[in-house]
Amino acid sequence: MNLLNVVSIKALGFFALLVAVIAAVLQYLENCKPTYQGIHYGMAHDMNKLQEDLRQKNKTCFILGASGETGQLLLKEIIERKLFSKITLIGRRQLTFEDTSIENLVQEVVDFEKLDEYAAAFQGHDVGYCCLGTTKAKAGAEGFVRVDHDYVLKSAELAKAGGCSHFNLESSKGADKTSGFLYLQVKGQVEADIELLDFERYSIFRPAVLMVDRQESRPTEWFARKLLGPFSSLFPTAMSIPIQSVIRAMVTNTLIPAGGKVEILENKSIYDLGKALEK
Ligand SMILES: NC(=O)c1ccc[n+]([C@@H]2O[C@H](COP(=O)([O-])OP(=O)(O)OC[C@H]3O[C@@H](n4cnc5c(N)ncnc54)[C@H](OP(=O)(O)O)[C@@H]3O)[C@@H](O)[C@H]2O)c1
């Protein structure tokens, strides 16, 4: 083994150790955050009964971003559990499903640049889930703000006007309208702007990096997932979260009583809440 190899092995070892230490510190800080009280409701309740109760209420929901990674898994979970009497997918394109026998599924194809013309699509839903979003790399800074702020806020406004009482927003860990980082600033700003709409119940989910085998190629996220992968089993909520935890937390939170008019679920709370629905 030559000197160069020894040096690179040592450097790799040091790097892995550094990431592990950072992950441990972040996990510790995450654990120090106050736990969302809904978890206790979630654990105490009989989830099967809560699901049956919701089915009996014949509620309807819509999903924004059902073609995305979170949206499509959320849709699958909701369909499998037969929680709503009608599910409306609101998106920019028609989706096709292998299973053509899915009942009570409606698709509304809208032009997000002219959302006011599609107000009818947002009418009459009890619960709304927003998993819409793009990236700066994909859409540029302006395009990112347009989607992650303007489209999301306008959709929330139309949903509120259309009678939606429980709006669920998939935001991001670190969302902060005063942040110097565009991504976190936009996420924080849209969270705050939607709060002003005064939904009867407003749930904000702030997941860290989603652990998912993304269909679309995103090199930065791919690299982050590869790097975080080995540590995520040791420190599951330090820097990442399995996407299934986010889906199940969203569903569980829909089933349990509100933990407040505005609920902010940080990464650790999402992870814990998701466990309540594990099969
Ligand atoms: N990825 C992560 O690690 C991570 C971590 C924390 C939070 N989040 C946030 O969580 C949310 C969901 O993330 P995800 O990774 O599940 O999303 P995703 O897979 O990228 O899906 C995004 C959804 O938004 C739609 N969309 C994108 N650009 C659009 C546009 N210009 N007009 C209309 N619709 C558009 C997509 O529709 P098409 O299929 O038609 O493109 C898709 O349905 C996002 O807000 C994201 O910022 C993500």
Image (cartoon, rainbow, N blue to C red):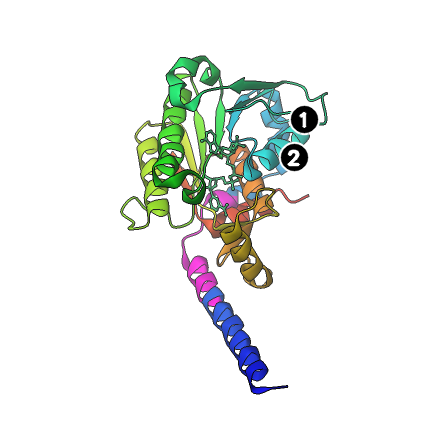
**Sequence-wise, which precedes: disc 2 or disc 1?**
2
Point 31% across, 33% down: residue: 193
Q: Which residue is mark 2?
A: 48
Q: Inspect the image, locate mark 1, and give the three-letter code of the amino acid beneath it.
A: Phe
Vertical comparison of 176 with 151: above or below: below
Residue 248, position as x, y percentages in the image:
58, 41
Point 60% across, 26% down: residue: 53
Instruction: State the separation of the CA atoms marked 2 and 1.
Output: 27 Å
Vertical comparison of 61 with 77: above or below: above
Q: Is mark 2 within 8 Å of ligand 1?
A: no
On residue 235, the disc is none
**Rendering quarter of residue 247:** top right
Q: Is mark 1 within 8 Å of ligand 1?
A: no
Vertical comparison of 153 with 237: above or below: above
Q: Viewer-nearest of labels 2 and 1?
A: 1
Q: Residues within 10 Å of mark 2 (few under 14, many from 20)?
A: few
Q: Which residue is mark 1?
A: 97
Residue 49, position as x, y percentages in the image:
63, 32
Image quarter of the C terminus: top right
**Rendering quarter of residue 32:** bottom left
**Rendering quarter of residue 206:** top left
Q: Is residue 188 left or right of residue 1?
A: left
Magenta stretch, residue numbers: 24-40
Q: Inspect the image, locate mark 2, and give the three-letter code of the amino acid beneath it.
A: Asn
Secondary structure beneath label 2: helix
Q: Is residue 46 left or right of residue 25?
A: right
* Farthest residue, direction left: 178
Residue 249, position as x, y percentages in the image:
54, 41
